[in-house]
Amino acid sequence: MQFEIKYIDNKIKGGFIGMNKKAAQELGIHYPHRQNIIEIYKTEEPIMQHTITHEKIEFCLMKKGLTYHEAHKIALKHERRTEPLRQILKEVCNKLK
């Protein structure tokens, strides 16, 4: 899926700095955007990049059936990796068939 990043000036309800549609649905957070939009709180560049990677991994895993908490835990382990995102997603998400 091709994601669009929407940068926001304030943290998301609950203090989150990133959010995707599937996580928002499970957490009961109002999320008026399409499925391919990820919200990211504007902060330092490295943090934003890690958060974008995290949200994409989390979304992919939740789409495969994991809960928010399961997907979040895995995404935290992989968000700081330096390989291309496509490679990370292939490795992490394709393990779940």
Image: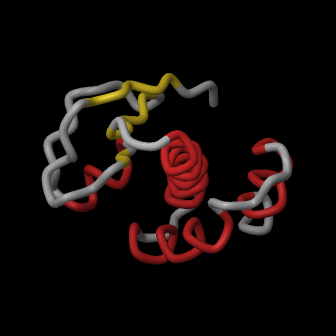
| Residue 88 point in image, percent of width and height | 79, 55
Using the rendered view, name the quadrant where residue 67 is placed.
bottom left
Q: In front: 36, or 63? A: 36
Q: Residue at x 80, y 42 (%)?
A: 86
Task: Name the residue at the front extreme.
Answer: 44
Is 34 located above or below residue 86 in the figure? above
In the image, taking residue 81 as reference, residue 20 lies left or right, namely left
Above or below: residue 69 compared with residue 22: below
Q: Residue at x 39, y 44 (%)?
A: 20
**Residue 48 x, y percent position in the rendering:** 49, 43
What x and y, as percent, mark residue 91? Answer: 83, 61
Q: Compared with residue 74, is residue 57 higher up or lower down, i.e. above or below?
A: above
The structure residue drawn at horizontal position 27% and vertical position 50%, both measured from the top left corner, is: 24
Towards the viewer: 91 or 41:
41
The residue that appears at 62% across and 25% down in the rendered structure is 2
Q: Quadrant of the N terminus?
A: top right
x, y percentage for residue 22? 38, 49
Count of numbered circles on the image: 0
Locate the C terminus and report the quarter of the image it occupies: bottom right
